[in-house]
Amino acid sequence: MYMLTATLMSAPASLAIAKIFWPEKEISKSNHDLKLMKGENKYMLEAASQGASCAVGVVANIISNIITFATLLAVFDAILSWLGGMFDCPQLSFSLICS
């Protein structure tokens, strides 16, 4: 579990370091026509509630991806354990291979 957490936390840092080592020398195509769109909300509370309701879908997507990754890891561990049992090594697992 710590490996998954460390992987997720290191992704933004690696992007920042990559930008430091290899900065953009050309003018970006996407920076020219950026305009802030005026929302339909009249009040700050309404905008905050609409943003929170949009964030629920993003959080649900992230949670489903984490569950899928954990499930695939468990299936991979079960397959390795089954293969290890065939070759007289039933304790074989992905974490044993990675450690």
Image: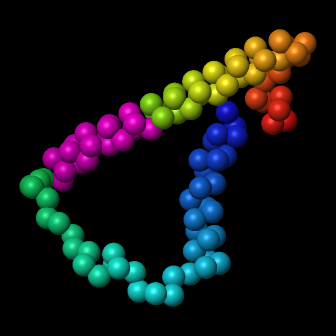
Q: Is residue 58 magenta?
A: yes
Quadrant location of residue 31? bottom left
State whether residue 40 is above or below residue 57: below
x, y (%) of residue 10?
A: 63, 54
What's the magenta region? 44-62
At horizontal 45% and vertical 31% (from top left) the residue drawn is 64
Q: Could you tell me if residue 45 is visible in this image? A: no
State whether residue 11 is above or below residue 99: below
The C terminus sits in image quarter: top right
Pick whichever, 38 or 70, lies toward us: 70
At horizontal 14% and vertical 59% (from top left) the residue drawn is 39
At horizontal 63% and vertical 21% (from top left) the residue drawn is 75
Quadrant location of residue 3? top right
| In this rendering, position of residue 71 left or right of residue 50 | right
x, y (%) of residue 73?
A: 64, 28
State whether residue 58 is above or below residue 79: below
x, y (%) of residue 66?
A: 52, 33
| In this rendering, position of residue 3 left or right of residue 91 | left
Per the picture, the main secondary structure of the magenta-coloured stretch is: helix
| In this rendering, position of residue 98 left or right of residue 12 | right
x, y (%) of residue 34?
A: 26, 75
Pick whichever, 74 or 37, lies toward us: 74
Quadrant location of residue 86? top right
Q: Could you tell me if residue 63 is visible in this image? A: yes
The N terminus sits in image quarter: top right
